[in-house]
Amino acid sequence: MSILVTGGAGYIGSHTVKELRARGEQVIIYDDLSTGFYQAAQDCMLVVGSLHHYDKLVETMRAFDVDSVVHFAAYSQVGESMNDPGKYYYNNVAGTIKLLNAMKENNVKRIVFSSTAATFGEPDSVPISEETPQHPASVYGTTKLMIEKILRDYDAAYGIRSVALRYFNAAGADESGLIGEAHNPETHLIPLIMQVLLGRREHISIYGTDYPTPDGTCVRDYIHVTDLATAHILSLNALRDGMASTAYNLGNGNGFSVREVIGMVEKVTGRKVATVEGPRRSGDPAVLIASSEKIMRELNWKPKFNELEQIIASAWRWHESHPYGY
Ligand code: UDP
Protein backbone atom coordinates (compact mmCIF):
# COMPACT_ATOMS: atom_id res chain seq x y z
CA MET A 1 0.00 0.00 0.00
CA SER A 2 1.35 3.45 -0.77
CA ILE A 3 0.43 7.13 -0.75
CA LEU A 4 0.38 9.17 -3.95
CA VAL A 5 1.47 12.75 -3.30
CA THR A 6 0.62 15.01 -6.24
CA GLY A 7 2.76 18.13 -6.27
CA GLY A 8 5.21 16.42 -3.92
CA ALA A 9 8.13 18.26 -5.54
CA GLY A 10 6.68 21.62 -4.50
CA TYR A 11 7.22 23.58 -1.31
CA ILE A 12 4.57 22.22 1.06
CA GLY A 13 4.39 18.90 -0.79
CA SER A 14 8.10 18.14 -0.37
CA HIS A 15 7.96 18.87 3.35
CA THR A 16 4.94 16.61 3.74
CA VAL A 17 6.66 13.82 1.78
CA LYS A 18 9.63 14.07 4.11
CA GLU A 19 7.43 13.77 7.22
CA LEU A 20 5.42 10.88 5.75
CA ARG A 21 8.60 8.96 4.94
CA ALA A 22 10.04 9.69 8.37
CA ARG A 23 7.02 7.77 9.70
CA GLY A 24 7.76 4.79 7.48
CA GLU A 25 5.11 5.43 4.82
CA GLN A 26 5.57 4.28 1.21
CA VAL A 27 5.32 7.47 -0.88
CA ILE A 28 5.14 8.08 -4.64
CA ILE A 29 5.45 11.67 -5.82
CA TYR A 30 3.42 12.58 -8.90
CA ASP A 31 4.50 15.98 -10.24
CA ASP A 32 4.80 17.61 -13.66
CA LEU A 33 7.77 19.70 -12.42
CA SER A 34 6.18 22.85 -13.90
CA THR A 35 6.66 24.70 -10.62
CA GLY A 36 8.26 22.00 -8.45
CA PHE A 37 11.91 20.89 -8.42
CA TYR A 38 13.15 17.34 -8.81
CA GLN A 39 15.77 18.11 -6.15
CA ALA A 40 12.93 18.68 -3.67
CA ALA A 41 11.85 15.07 -4.24
CA GLN A 42 15.16 14.05 -2.63
CA ASP A 43 15.47 10.26 -3.05
CA CYS A 44 11.72 9.59 -3.13
CA MET A 45 10.13 7.75 -6.06
CA LEU A 46 9.04 10.44 -8.55
CA VAL A 47 6.65 9.95 -11.45
CA VAL A 48 6.80 12.95 -13.78
CA GLY A 49 3.28 13.44 -15.03
CA SER A 50 0.42 15.89 -15.31
CA LEU A 51 -3.02 15.71 -13.72
CA HIS A 52 -4.29 15.70 -17.30
CA HIS A 53 -2.55 12.40 -18.07
CA TYR A 54 -5.50 10.35 -16.93
CA ASP A 55 -4.06 7.00 -18.07
CA LYS A 56 -0.77 7.73 -16.34
CA LEU A 57 -2.59 8.54 -13.10
CA VAL A 58 -4.59 5.32 -13.31
CA GLU A 59 -1.49 3.28 -14.15
CA THR A 60 0.60 4.87 -11.38
CA MET A 61 -2.07 4.17 -8.77
CA ARG A 62 -2.36 0.59 -9.96
CA ALA A 63 1.40 -0.06 -10.28
CA PHE A 64 2.21 1.21 -6.79
CA ASP A 65 -0.88 -0.13 -5.04
CA VAL A 66 -1.94 3.36 -3.96
CA ASP A 67 -4.62 3.48 -1.26
CA SER A 68 -4.50 7.20 -0.31
CA VAL A 69 -3.80 10.48 -2.08
CA VAL A 70 -2.40 13.74 -0.73
CA HIS A 71 -3.13 16.36 -3.37
CA PHE A 72 -0.97 19.49 -3.64
CA ALA A 73 -0.56 19.81 -7.41
CA ALA A 74 -1.99 23.20 -8.40
CA TYR A 75 -1.10 26.64 -9.66
CA SER A 76 -1.16 28.98 -6.70
CA GLN A 77 -0.45 32.58 -7.70
CA VAL A 78 -3.34 34.92 -6.98
CA GLY A 79 -2.24 37.63 -9.45
CA GLU A 80 -1.66 35.20 -12.30
CA SER A 81 -5.04 33.56 -11.67
CA MET A 82 -6.79 36.89 -12.32
CA ASN A 83 -4.90 37.46 -15.60
CA ASP A 84 -5.17 33.87 -16.84
CA PRO A 85 -8.24 32.26 -15.25
CA GLY A 86 -8.41 29.55 -17.91
CA LYS A 87 -5.05 28.19 -16.82
CA TYR A 88 -6.30 27.95 -13.23
CA TYR A 89 -9.72 26.44 -13.90
CA TYR A 90 -8.21 23.92 -16.32
CA ASN A 91 -5.30 22.82 -14.17
CA ASN A 92 -6.70 23.11 -10.66
CA VAL A 93 -10.35 22.18 -11.20
CA ALA A 94 -10.35 20.01 -14.33
CA GLY A 95 -7.06 18.39 -13.26
CA THR A 96 -8.48 17.48 -9.85
CA ILE A 97 -11.56 15.94 -11.46
CA LYS A 98 -9.26 13.67 -13.48
CA LEU A 99 -7.36 12.75 -10.34
CA LEU A 100 -10.60 11.93 -8.52
CA ASN A 101 -11.86 9.87 -11.45
CA ALA A 102 -8.58 7.94 -11.50
CA MET A 103 -9.06 7.33 -7.76
CA LYS A 104 -12.60 6.12 -8.41
CA GLU A 105 -11.36 3.76 -11.11
CA ASN A 106 -8.75 2.32 -8.70
CA ASN A 107 -11.07 2.23 -5.71
CA VAL A 108 -8.86 4.70 -3.79
CA LYS A 109 -11.11 6.15 -1.10
CA ARG A 110 -9.07 8.74 0.83
CA ILE A 111 -7.69 12.13 -0.11
CA VAL A 112 -6.14 15.00 1.85
CA PHE A 113 -6.51 18.18 -0.17
CA SER A 114 -4.44 21.33 -0.14
CA SER A 115 -6.91 24.20 0.21
CA THR A 116 -6.29 27.78 1.26
CA ALA A 117 -7.30 30.79 3.32
CA ALA A 118 -7.91 32.43 -0.07
CA THR A 119 -11.26 30.57 -0.13
CA PHE A 120 -12.45 33.06 2.51
CA GLY A 121 -11.68 36.29 0.64
CA GLU A 122 -12.15 39.41 2.80
CA PRO A 123 -13.66 38.08 6.04
CA ASP A 124 -16.14 40.10 8.10
CA SER A 125 -14.23 39.26 11.26
CA VAL A 126 -11.14 37.40 12.50
CA PRO A 127 -10.11 34.86 13.60
CA ILE A 128 -11.45 32.86 10.68
CA SER A 129 -13.07 29.59 11.71
CA GLU A 130 -14.52 26.79 9.59
CA GLU A 131 -17.91 28.45 10.05
CA THR A 132 -16.74 31.72 8.48
CA PRO A 133 -18.51 32.14 5.10
CA GLN A 134 -16.26 31.47 2.10
CA HIS A 135 -16.34 34.24 -0.53
CA PRO A 136 -13.07 34.01 -2.46
CA ALA A 137 -11.79 37.26 -3.95
CA SER A 138 -9.57 35.62 -6.59
CA VAL A 139 -9.82 32.98 -9.29
CA TYR A 140 -7.22 30.97 -7.38
CA GLY A 141 -9.36 30.96 -4.23
CA THR A 142 -12.43 30.12 -6.33
CA THR A 143 -10.72 27.08 -7.88
CA LYS A 144 -9.91 25.73 -4.42
CA LEU A 145 -13.44 26.36 -3.14
CA MET A 146 -14.88 24.60 -6.20
CA ILE A 147 -12.68 21.60 -5.45
CA GLU A 148 -13.88 21.54 -1.82
CA LYS A 149 -17.43 21.31 -3.18
CA ILE A 150 -16.49 18.63 -5.72
CA LEU A 151 -14.90 16.60 -2.90
CA ARG A 152 -18.14 16.69 -0.91
CA ASP A 153 -20.07 15.49 -3.95
CA TYR A 154 -17.55 12.69 -4.67
CA ASP A 155 -17.93 11.54 -1.09
CA ALA A 156 -21.74 11.53 -1.28
CA ALA A 157 -21.81 9.69 -4.61
CA TYR A 158 -18.69 7.49 -4.60
CA GLY A 159 -17.62 7.26 -0.97
CA ILE A 160 -14.27 9.02 -1.47
CA ARG A 161 -13.60 10.65 1.92
CA SER A 162 -11.53 13.82 2.15
CA VAL A 163 -9.98 16.38 4.44
CA ALA A 164 -9.51 19.89 3.02
CA LEU A 165 -6.74 21.78 4.80
CA ARG A 166 -6.96 25.55 4.42
CA TYR A 167 -3.49 26.94 4.96
CA PHE A 168 -2.89 30.50 5.98
CA ASN A 169 0.66 31.79 5.17
CA ALA A 170 3.07 28.87 4.84
CA ALA A 171 6.64 29.82 5.77
CA GLY A 172 9.93 28.40 7.01
CA ALA A 173 11.96 25.36 5.99
CA ASP A 174 12.77 21.86 7.12
CA GLU A 175 15.27 21.47 9.95
CA SER A 176 17.58 19.31 7.80
CA GLY A 177 18.42 22.33 5.64
CA LEU A 178 17.95 20.11 2.55
CA ILE A 179 14.55 21.39 1.40
CA GLY A 180 12.93 24.79 1.65
CA GLU A 181 10.83 27.40 -0.13
CA ALA A 182 11.66 28.00 -3.79
CA HIS A 183 9.37 29.55 -6.38
CA ASN A 184 10.16 30.90 -9.80
CA PRO A 185 9.20 33.69 -10.02
CA GLU A 186 9.13 34.39 -6.28
CA THR A 187 6.11 36.38 -5.07
CA HIS A 188 6.00 35.61 -1.33
CA LEU A 189 6.98 38.09 1.33
CA ILE A 190 9.53 36.17 3.42
CA PRO A 191 11.58 34.68 0.54
CA LEU A 192 11.57 38.08 -1.19
CA ILE A 193 12.95 39.75 1.94
CA MET A 194 15.65 37.06 2.06
CA GLN A 195 16.52 37.81 -1.56
CA VAL A 196 17.10 41.44 -0.60
CA LEU A 197 19.51 40.31 2.11
CA LEU A 198 21.26 38.01 -0.36
CA GLY A 199 21.81 40.86 -2.81
CA ARG A 200 19.40 39.46 -5.39
CA ARG A 201 17.07 42.49 -5.21
CA GLU A 202 17.56 46.07 -4.15
CA HIS A 203 14.61 46.37 -1.79
CA ILE A 204 11.34 44.87 -0.67
CA SER A 205 8.21 46.76 -1.73
CA ILE A 206 5.64 47.09 1.01
CA TYR A 207 2.30 46.61 -0.72
CA GLY A 208 0.10 49.24 0.89
CA THR A 209 0.57 51.32 4.04
CA ASP A 210 -2.99 52.60 4.41
CA TYR A 211 -4.75 49.44 5.58
CA PRO A 212 -6.95 49.69 8.70
CA THR A 213 -4.29 47.91 10.80
CA PRO A 214 -2.09 49.27 13.63
CA ASP A 215 0.85 50.12 11.34
CA GLY A 216 -1.10 50.41 8.07
CA THR A 217 0.32 47.22 6.49
CA CYS A 218 -1.40 43.87 5.93
CA VAL A 219 -1.57 41.38 8.77
CA ARG A 220 -1.11 37.65 8.10
CA ASP A 221 -0.90 34.42 10.08
CA TYR A 222 2.42 32.67 9.32
CA ILE A 223 2.53 28.93 9.87
CA HIS A 224 5.61 26.70 9.65
CA VAL A 225 5.62 24.30 6.71
CA THR A 226 6.54 21.35 8.95
CA ASP A 227 3.49 22.06 11.12
CA LEU A 228 1.41 21.99 7.94
CA ALA A 229 3.04 18.68 7.01
CA THR A 230 2.09 17.21 10.39
CA ALA A 231 -1.53 18.26 9.85
CA HIS A 232 -1.62 16.23 6.61
CA ILE A 233 -0.38 13.14 8.43
CA LEU A 234 -2.92 13.51 11.24
CA SER A 235 -5.68 14.02 8.66
CA LEU A 236 -4.67 10.97 6.66
CA ASN A 237 -4.51 8.81 9.76
CA ALA A 238 -7.93 10.06 10.87
CA LEU A 239 -9.37 9.13 7.46
CA ARG A 240 -7.78 5.68 7.84
CA ASP A 241 -9.53 5.41 11.20
CA GLY A 242 -12.84 6.10 9.50
CA MET A 243 -13.30 9.83 10.09
CA ALA A 244 -15.99 11.48 7.95
CA SER A 245 -15.00 14.10 5.38
CA THR A 246 -14.23 17.51 6.84
CA ALA A 247 -12.19 20.71 6.49
CA TYR A 248 -9.75 22.42 8.85
CA ASN A 249 -8.17 25.88 8.97
CA LEU A 250 -4.45 25.91 9.70
CA GLY A 251 -2.59 28.83 11.20
CA ASN A 252 -0.86 29.86 14.41
CA GLY A 253 -3.70 32.16 15.40
CA ASN A 254 -1.37 35.20 15.60
CA GLY A 255 -1.22 38.03 13.11
CA PHE A 256 1.93 39.89 12.04
CA SER A 257 2.06 42.95 9.81
CA VAL A 258 4.39 43.26 6.82
CA ARG A 259 6.47 45.74 8.82
CA GLU A 260 6.63 43.33 11.78
CA VAL A 261 7.83 40.52 9.50
CA ILE A 262 10.55 42.75 8.07
CA GLY A 263 11.53 43.80 11.61
CA MET A 264 11.74 40.15 12.67
CA VAL A 265 13.96 39.26 9.70
CA GLU A 266 16.26 42.13 10.71
CA LYS A 267 16.34 40.83 14.29
CA VAL A 268 17.04 37.23 13.28
CA THR A 269 19.73 38.04 10.71
CA GLY A 270 21.22 41.15 12.31
CA ARG A 271 21.01 42.89 8.92
CA LYS A 272 19.05 45.90 7.70
CA VAL A 273 16.40 45.30 4.99
CA ALA A 274 15.93 48.05 2.37
CA THR A 275 12.22 48.82 1.94
CA VAL A 276 10.14 50.94 -0.41
CA GLU A 277 6.52 51.80 0.34
CA GLY A 278 4.29 51.03 -2.63
CA PRO A 279 0.61 50.81 -3.53
CA ARG A 280 -1.68 48.02 -2.40
CA ARG A 281 -1.60 44.74 -4.33
CA SER A 282 -5.10 44.08 -5.66
CA GLY A 283 -7.06 41.36 -3.89
CA ASP A 284 -5.09 41.53 -0.61
CA PRO A 285 -7.40 41.53 2.44
CA ALA A 286 -6.22 43.70 5.37
CA VAL A 287 -6.14 40.98 8.03
CA LEU A 288 -6.17 37.16 7.79
CA ILE A 289 -5.84 35.23 11.03
CA ALA A 290 -6.87 31.61 11.48
CA SER A 291 -8.69 29.87 14.23
CA SER A 292 -7.28 26.33 14.23
CA GLU A 293 -9.29 25.26 17.26
CA LYS A 294 -11.12 22.59 15.31
CA ILE A 295 -8.07 20.57 14.21
CA MET A 296 -6.47 21.09 17.64
CA ARG A 297 -9.57 19.70 19.30
CA GLU A 298 -10.40 16.88 16.88
CA LEU A 299 -6.94 15.67 15.79
CA ASN A 300 -4.78 16.97 18.62
CA TRP A 301 -2.70 19.04 16.18
CA LYS A 302 -0.40 21.51 17.87
CA PRO A 303 2.04 23.74 16.00
CA LYS A 304 5.64 23.17 17.10
CA PHE A 305 6.89 26.41 15.57
CA ASN A 306 4.51 28.91 17.13
CA GLU A 307 6.96 31.83 17.28
CA LEU A 308 7.51 33.98 14.20
CA GLU A 309 11.17 34.21 15.17
CA GLN A 310 11.64 30.41 14.88
CA ILE A 311 9.82 30.33 11.55
CA ILE A 312 11.97 33.11 10.10
CA ALA A 313 15.17 31.62 11.51
CA SER A 314 14.43 28.34 9.73
CA ALA A 315 13.65 30.19 6.49
CA TRP A 316 16.91 32.13 6.74
CA ARG A 317 18.98 28.96 7.24
CA TRP A 318 17.59 27.59 3.99
CA HIS A 319 17.93 30.78 1.95
CA GLU A 320 21.40 31.56 3.20
CA SER A 321 22.62 28.11 2.20
CA HIS A 322 20.62 28.09 -1.10
CA PRO A 323 20.74 31.71 -2.32
CA TYR A 324 19.53 30.66 -5.79
CA GLY A 325 17.08 27.99 -4.60
CA TYR A 326 17.64 24.37 -5.67
N1 UDP B 1 3.78 41.59 0.47
C1 UDP B 1 4.47 42.79 0.37
N2 UDP B 1 5.50 42.86 -0.53
C2 UDP B 1 5.87 41.83 -1.33
C3 UDP B 1 5.15 40.60 -1.20
C4 UDP B 1 4.12 40.52 -0.29
O1 UDP B 1 4.18 43.75 1.07
O2 UDP B 1 6.81 41.98 -2.12
C5 UDP B 1 2.67 41.49 1.45
C6 UDP B 1 1.34 41.10 0.83
O3 UDP B 1 0.63 42.25 0.44
C7 UDP B 1 0.66 40.35 1.99
C8 UDP B 1 1.82 39.75 2.76
O4 UDP B 1 3.00 40.45 2.34
O5 UDP B 1 0.01 41.26 2.82
C9 UDP B 1 2.02 38.27 2.48
O6 UDP B 1 2.04 38.09 1.09
P1 UDP B 1 2.43 36.73 0.41
O7 UDP B 1 2.42 36.94 -1.09
O8 UDP B 1 3.68 36.20 1.02
O9 UDP B 1 1.28 35.72 0.83
P2 UDP B 1 -0.33 35.82 0.65
O10 UDP B 1 -0.84 36.55 1.87
O11 UDP B 1 -0.61 36.53 -0.62
O12 UDP B 1 -0.74 34.39 0.63
Image (cartoon, helix red, strand yellow):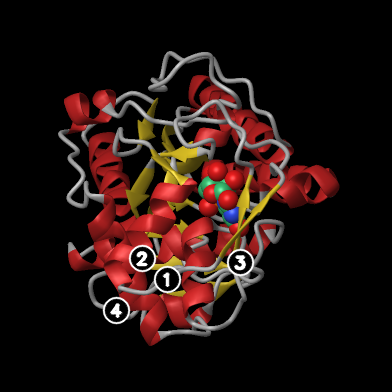
SS class, disc 1: loop
Q: Which residue is mark 1?
A: 272
Q: Residue 77's x, y, as percent? A: 66, 52
Question: Which mark is on residue 266?
Answer: 2
> What is the three-letter code of the residue carrying label 4?
Gly
Indicate which label's residue lies in the foreground, 3 or 2. Answer: 2
Q: Does label 4 or label 3 sit earlier along the sequence?
A: 4
Q: How far apart, in angstroms, are the residues tagged by discs 1 and 3? A: 21 Å
Q: Is residue 259 left or right of residue 296?
A: right
Which of the two residues, 317 or 244, is positioned nearer the viewer here? Answer: 317
Q: What residue is at 28 percent from the left and 44 percent from the top? A: 231
Q: What residue is at 53 percent from the left and 68 percent from the top? A: 274
Q: Residue 266's x, y, as percent? A: 36, 65
SS class, disc 4: loop
Q: How far apart, in angstroms, are the residues tagged by discs 2 and 4? A: 21 Å
Indicate which label's residue lies in the foreground, 2 or 4. Answer: 2
Q: How far apart, in angstroms, are the residues tagged by discs 1 and 2? A: 6 Å
Q: Is residue 240 visible?
A: yes
SS class, disc 3: loop
Q: Which residue is mark 3?
A: 186
Q: What residue is at 65 percent from the left and 57 percent from the top? A: 51
Q: Does label 1 or label 4 sit earlier along the sequence?
A: 4
Q: Does label 1 or label 3 sit earlier along the sequence?
A: 3
Q: What residue is at 30 percent from the left and 73 percent from the top? A: 270
Indicate which label's residue lies in the foreground, 1 or 3. Answer: 1
Q: Is mark 4 within 8 Å of ligand 1?
A: no
